[in-house]
Amino acid sequence: MQNGLSRKHYTDMFRPLNKNSRAYARLILGLYVAAILLSIVIGQTFLEMGGIAAYCAVGLLMLFIGTRLRGLNNIIHECTHRSFAVERDDNVTFGRTAAALVFNTFEAYQKEHVSHHINRGNYELDLDFHHRKGFRIEEKLSPLVIARHILTPILGLHLYRYCRPNFSAADGRIYQLLKFAIVICALTFAVFNPLAAFLLVFLPYAWIYTAINYWTDCIDHGGILTESEEIDAARNFIVPKPLRLVLFPRNNCYHLLHHLYPSVPSQHFDHCHELLLLDPAYSEVHGRETRAACEMTG
């Protein structure tokens, strides 16, 4: 029991929830990659057309590519909790593949993220946030603090901590070769079309994707990271489903739910959230954070 919430009761209730089959998990991962590649092709076409409307479309595509990269990051996260695919080995394979696509390793991500769940709020032991201490994500939210969090990625001040490509072979040589192959393809593309490569490949990864990661950390834990109780240290930030598909790939707007029940597959977050709202403790915390968010954003 934690603040009136029966963790065991809901853990037992959620345990039978189904995960993705191998074929469906492969399809999901493939669709994210296809969306990125198609967006690059479409964006290049708009750049060749020229004009204000075309350049605005390119800007939207850059943002969209960044969100698809975030979706790949979310898949790594789900694989870490073995909630993406049915088979344990499939979670490792898909996690390593998704990690290679965003220049990370599944091994490093696992180590950092597991430490976050165990030592959340302890900057020395929480390896997810260890290198992010200077951003003061735990600082109580106010209009000034929110403005600082908004501006930090826009000004690129987050890059030295959030843009850290990992080209090691920790996951195996084949995944390292995949990362080098992506770099070679990107550089080849840059030789023939440097502007398109800069706007549609390098910026979405180095700036937009990392900015989304920073803002998501602030949404998930801003002002409450160091709270002693798990139920008080994360928040949901639920937006309409059409907007969620773009801005919160893989339903990652349910971060309070995830911290309480990390093994729940993301496709069940809506259903589990509705069930948890019947619990007074969960409902009170979710409502409090929702009201606070509305007040802060005016």
Image (cartoon, rainbow, N blue to C red):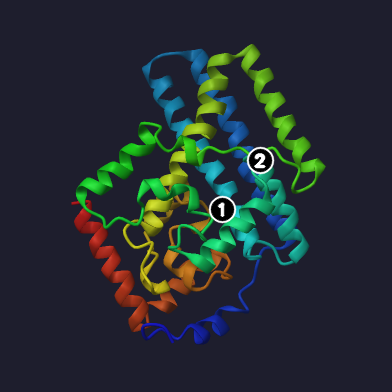
Quarter of the image where one finds residue 32: top right
For residue 294, above or below residue 283: above
Residue found 64% across the figure and 38% down from its top: 34
Q: Secondary structure at mark 1?
A: helix
Quarter of the image where one finds residue 293: bottom left
Task: Give the class, few, some or many, for how many residues have Cα within 10 Å of label 1's Cα (few <14, many ≥20).
Answer: many
Q: Secondary structure at mark 2?
A: helix
Q: Position of residue 70 (x, y in %)?
A: 53, 45
Q: Position of residue 94 (x, y in %)?
A: 71, 53
Residue found 65% across the figure and 51% down from its top: 108
Quarter of the image where one finds residue 80: bottom right
For residue 240, above or below residue 285: above
- Report which residue position mark 2 lands on: 101
Residue 10 located left or right of residue 231: right
The residue type indicated by label 1 comes to: Asn
Q: Position of residue 211 (x, y in %)?
A: 44, 40
For residue 283, above or below residue 75: below
Give the mark nearest the N terminus, 2 or 1: 1
Q: CA distance from mark 2 to mark 1?
A: 12 Å
Task: Give the class, few, some or many, for how many residues have Cα within 10 Å of label 2's Cα (few <14, many ≥20).
Answer: some
Marks 2 & 1, CB-CB < 8 Å contact: no
- Circle on res. 248: none
* Residue that protrudes farthest toward the front in the picture: 124
Q: Position of residue 248 (x, y in %)?
A: 46, 51
* Quadrant housing the N terminus: bottom left
Residue 75 located left or right of residue 159: right
* Residue that protrudes farthest toward the right in the picture: 173
Residue found 49% across the figure and 48% down from its top: 131
Residue found 45% across the figure and 86% down from its top: 6
The residue type indicated by label 2 comes to: Leu
- Report which residue position mark 1 lands on: 74
